[in-house]
Image (cartoon, rainbow, N blue to C red):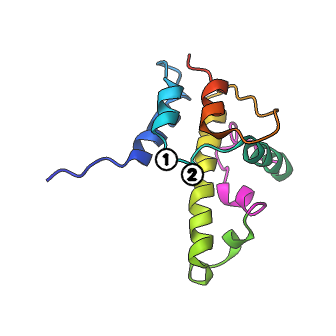
Amino acid sequence: GKKTIEQATVVNHVLQALQFGDRAVDLKRLFREMPPGTLPTRSEWNRLDELQALSGCDVVRDKSFFMKEILKGILPSVAKETGDKTQGEIQAEREWYGKMRVWSELKKGRVPVDASVEGDAGAESAKKRARTE
């Protein structure tokens, strides 16, 4: 039988397609279909921006951008060997890598995001702040 396509795979492909700009992407619909907690909150978005600046890398220009280097500033457990990590650390890393994929792909696609307002962005605010052109 055929294998079903994972939701995360579809989301990642759509986010990557933003870089090419060939077609309009309905970001509101895409965000609605994403699992809860996948979109970074405003404070998480700002923290990722801050850590990117401190690392000296640019996710848009640097092909050698490594999420792990930025994530070390949020979760020190990423420096541990996999066998030494707790289940909680593994889950936290999985969640943060998902947020970082969304953050980095929206940046690469040059989607304007206003993360300047304090508080929790959540999916609803992200829908409002994303361009659908």
Q: How far from the left and from the top, in percent, is residue 111?
A: 64, 26
Q: Nearer the viewer, residue 123 or 90?
A: 123
| Left or right of 65 in this view: 1 | left
Q: Residue 11 colored magenta? A: no
Tags 2 and 1 touching, CB below 8 Å: yes
- Residue visible at 49% across and 23% down? 25
Q: Amino acid at mark 2?
A: Gly
Determine which residue is flagged by label 1: 35
Q: Which mark is residue 98?
A: 2
Decide which of 122, 26 is in the foreground and name it.
122
Q: Main secondary structure of the magenta part?
A: loop
Sooner in the amino-acid sequence: mark 2 or mark 1: 1
Query: In the displayed structure, would residue 41 be above or below residue 66?
Result: above
Query: What residue is drawn where x is 74% and y is 56%?
Result: 70
Q: Residue 123 occupies which quadrant of the picture?
A: top right
Label 2 vs label 1: CA separation? 10 Å
